[in-house]
Amino acid sequence: MAAWSERLAGVRGVLLDISGVLHDSGEGGGVPIPGSVEALARLKRSQLKVRFCTNESQKSRGDLVGLLRHMGFDISEDEVTAPAPATCLILKERGLRPHLLIHDGIRSEFAQIDTSNPNCVVIADAGESFSYQNMNKAFQVLMELDNPVLISLGKGRYYKETSGLMLDVGAYTKALEYACGIKAEVVGKPAPGYFQSALQEMGVESHEAIMIGDDIVGDVGGAQRCGMRALQVRTGKFRFYIYLTLTCVHGMRPSDEHHPEVKADGYVDDLAEAVDLLLQHAHQ
Amino acid sequence: MAAWSERLAGVRGVLLDISGVLHDSGEGGGVPIPGSVEALARLKRSQLKVRFCTNESQKSRGDLVGLLRHMGFDISEDEVTAPAPATCLILKERGLRPHLLIHDGIRSEFAQIDTSNPNCVVIADAGESFSYQNMNKAFQVLMELDNPVLISLGKGRYYKETSGLMLDVGAYTKALEYACGIKAEVVGKPAPGYFQSALQEMGVESHEAIMIGDDIVGDVGGAQRCGMRALQVRTGKFRFYIYLTLTCVHGMRPSDEHHPEVKADGYVDDLAEAVDLLLQHAHQ
């Protein structure tokens, strides 16, 4: 690989994933990843622009920011690009009235949305609300529509909580796609429009921006397809891949650093190392 | 299409799907489809061999046959090819110890199977047992295996109960496949080996056999790929497609009689019409 100075030259803006980069989510809001509070503070004191780009769809933007601030992170609501507010804009633009298959923690984001006589389904990381009954209701709504529209807040396979790996919305979206014979529209990473709106809100062109995340497909691959650079941290769900590499050399799931299609522009241990490198080499 | 006499010539054996052909499942076991009890009786009085080939994975074979006999159907347990007993044979042959994501109604079929320290997951139509917690447990078991094996009892998208359409096991199998990055092994229709074992048990070659079912992909397409002929009945889930054709001419889901890839050898209103035609034209 080229030297860091070359790989990071000209970076003016940084998009940060939240879960797995700032903190590991979980009971009571989770725990900060060691060194991340201080690393974010250093990054925000620099000349680099910073924005947060998350697929969090269990908590409202306000609740998420509240939790992170409580852990010591310097973050405010208007710095966060999140899929629920982005979805509300789309619903209003297109006159869509959703049946909501979502977690109660995010219901407040949809308070201004008309949900009567639904003409689409919105699916988010509903967690325990992914009961058979709730999934079947969403399926039946879709099957009764002449032109079924399914909007999925992200398409993550799973995420890491302090208690272990948890199925994410993408798995349940696949279930509805297969049952109904349709394709969901994704609002969230890795959808190009989602990264573009985050870049626009940050006021930085894609070639001047870098994404930092723990998901090789959702964060790294998605950002690169938009013309950005991307670093993968070895925290969050990444750590599980390391374990897989050691235990499952001939297994079916590739380790992220050997993903068959996506190569990050660099791999770092954690946000702290990423910030060290950025402050040393970016904006040159 | 050719005349019925040509299409049904030389048929010596009939494989019958159960749900949607004999009865509609649902509360209290469901209801027989009008004319099917009598049609089955006529078929069994003929020279044609008869076997039942089902993907039922919520009820044990004994319970299913008990319900059908109670409705008046002439059926016995040893005439039924069902995915749970077929799966048990595979588990024993390969020394697999399953984590079971199944409906309680079928648990008795696995009574002789070692489920300690699981090295695979078996997924069936678990219905209400498809909770987030149960799905996540199966996901975690798979992710901890060096060589994750997922066995799915059928891959149906949905089925029709008296109360409406219900998500079937295939949707949940897709969810686990996507989350784990693996491909399930299917035991049940439309897997070729499953049809072949039913033919063997009936003692009829594929070119002498015909499948009668309501599922264009699982029944008709699967049987045809094994060299059998296949009729689709307009009962069971088929009736829902008729409704779709009328309300959703430009929709995304094709009506079965216009399925892009699969064409049945004939379409009949119900089992009664299929039996009329078979008794008139088969075995000639």
Image: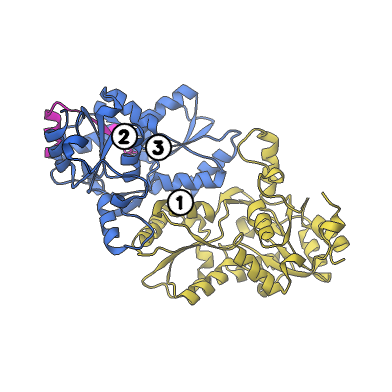
Chain colours: A blue, B yellow
Query: Are discs 3 and 2 less than 8 Å apart at CB?
Result: no
* Residue pointed to by mark 2: A60
Residue B42 x/y as whole percent: 83, 66
Q: Quadrant of the C terminus of chain B?
A: bottom right
Residue B220 higher or lower than B91, as above or below? above
Residue A17 x/y as whole percent: 26, 38
Observer-side mark, 3 or 2, equals 3
Residue A36 x/y as whole percent: 15, 41
Query: Are discs 1 and 3 less than 8 Å apart at CB?
Result: no
Q: Are marks 3 and 2 on the same chain?
A: yes
Q: CA distance from mark 3 to mark 2?
A: 13 Å
Secondary structure, mark 2, is loop
Residue A209 higher or lower than A101, as above or below? above
Left/right placement of residue A159 relative to residue A49 reads right
Observer-side mark, 2 or 1, equals 1
| Picture quadrant of residue A62 | top left
* Label 1 CA crowd tier, 10 Å (few <14, some 14–19, many 20+): many
Residue A73 x/y as whole percent: 16, 36
Q: Are marks 1 and 3 on the same chain?
A: no
- Residue under the point 64% across and 53% down: B217
* Label 2 CA crowd tier, 10 Å (few <14, some 14–19, many 20+): many
Q: Which residues are magenta?
A: A38-61
Res. A153 mark: 3
At label 1, the amino acid type is: Ala
- Residue under the point 43% across and 56% down: B182
Q: CA distance from mark 2 to mark 1?
A: 25 Å
* Residue pointed to by mark 1: B175
Secondary structure, mark 1, is helix
Left/right placement of residue A95 relative to residue B224 reads left
Nearer to us in this view, A67 or B149: B149
